[in-house]
Image (cartoon, rainbow, N blue to C red):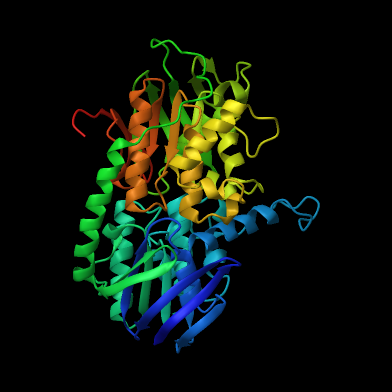
Amino acid sequence: MIKINNAQYKISDYKTFSIPELTIQSRDSWAFVGSNGSGKSILVKALAGNLLKLSGEFTNQFTKIETLSFELLQKMVDDEWKRNNSDMVSDGEDDTGLTTAQVIEENCQDSLLCQQLAKQFDIEPLLQKRFKYLSTGETRKTLLCRTLMSSPELLILDEPFDGLDVASRQQLGLLLSQLSQQGITLIVVLNRFNDIPDFIENVGVIAECQLIKTGKRQELLQDQVIEQLRTLESLQNIHLPDTDEFPATLSDELPRVILRHGYVQYNEKPIINDLNWQVNAHENWQIVGPNGAGKSTLLSLITGDHPQGYCNDLTLFGYKRGSGETIWDIKKHIGYVSSSFHLDYRVSSSVKNVLLSGYYDSIGIYCTTSDKQNKLADEWLSLLNLTKQANQPFQSLSWGQQRLVLIARALVKHPTLLILDEPLQGLDQLNRELVKGWIDLLIKKGHSQLLFVSHHAEDAPNCITHRLTFVRSNDEGYRYCLDEVSNK
């Protein structure tokens, strides 16, 4: 069991995390829910015994503890990035990175168990694929398999459902239920009350770096639902800061995106195959499909970040790709957020400078910003409730706070095309509603339109007018359905 009494944990020189009382028995199932910046990741470290305790009592009788978090995912991506950009590679060596199987078995060599777990998570065909080429959802499944390889007594999962499509979330919930029935003590840390699996018996609520309430699931959720409904009412009066200057106005007759017979392949296997797609002015598209279908790949063609973009018949804002346009001609019309962009934002920069970089489509700030840009950035910080953190390092924010800042960065210039790839991943319910409100407000202003990817149907903002769906076909590829959304 774990037993905690009046414990204070050190977060920084001026900040602590408090757990007044908590008892977790063997075979218990717990969900801890909190908003962004409330201290969820700190709780994970405290329960795992990886946080400095200043006072109080902490007893932990579990000997095999495993944790899975966004931070672990970020570290593994960083490790792969460093490996592929280091002097460890011999001359002439083709550094292709670790395979999915190697990642799963890195700490526990058991190929049979690896195969069994991969089959359970439906990633068996990916075992020999390079880890760095996996989609967000595939990466999440891989790390879950890796975590289960050591058969832990206590399993702590920080936001395990984010980045997974509907089928994968249901699959994971079923697997976690089975693990609980097998006697594993389970703790899931979430920002969505709706993500609490049905089998969970106990719930705790975290706020302002304190565990403020614990109890049986049904009693506690009834209290919290009432509080959420009251808080959501305050979101009706939100306003967006203005922009520094709008990009050059494009004619309504000019399609924003034209892709003819789109084709992308990896290792001679087509990921996107013969996709014909046109985005006209004032159309707002939702792009849906299972993990690994190619949704993020499609968006990377548009943003200019995919090398095979120049092999395609692609026209953006009237510029045919490869006709002499610069990447900056394209990016000045685009605001962009994705999970991979978040993982790659490694520059040491202040929170305010990350926001300001949205005006220049850069990672960091390398020129003098105007007084108006600084004033507008301050307005965004106030909207984000991060004014006090303006000059702090971006990496010092919680994962959810970082995501909010990057979303605001994409919005600051009111771009012609706002491209959001799983933007709400890692956000609690209130912040998801807040961001959806921002998107709808921006679209109503009439200068921007949207390309939106999310596995959660309820995450789509009200402005969606069209839908592009990736549908699995019999030959293990995908076909594409393009529909107008008449009734959201």
Residue 438 vs residue 185, the one in the foreground:
438
Quadrant assignment for the C terminus: top left
Q: Residue at x 78, y 50 (%)?
A: 92
Residue 97 occupies which quadrant of the picture? bottom right
293 or 215, which lies in front? 215
* Residue 439 versus residue 81 in the image, above or below: above
How many numbered circles are shown?
0
Check the image and report above or below for 420 versus 127: above
Q: Is residue 93 left or right of residue 438?
A: right
| Side of 211 relative to 200 (left or right) | right
Q: Relative to residue 182, is residue 305 drawn left or right?
A: right
- Measured as percent of width and height from the top left, residue 350 is found at 62, 46
Judged from this view, the residue extending furthest toward the right is: 91
Q: Residue at x 30, y 74 (%)?
A: 214
- Please provide percent x and percent y for residue 432: 35, 46
Which residue is at the front of the view, 385 or 262? Answer: 385
Where is the N terminus found, in terms of image quarters?
bottom left
Residue 237's image quarter?
A: top left
Q: Is residue 345 visible?
A: yes
Please tell me whether residue 115 is drawn above or below residue 287 in the rendered image: below
Q: Position of residue 384 (x, y in %)?
A: 45, 44
Residue 337 x/y as whole percent? 48, 39
Dividing the picture into quadrants, the one containing residue 37 is bottom left
Residue 337 visible, this orientation: no
For the point 40% across and 86% down, the residue is 3
Question: What's the residue at 51%, 69% (across, down)?
Answer: 16
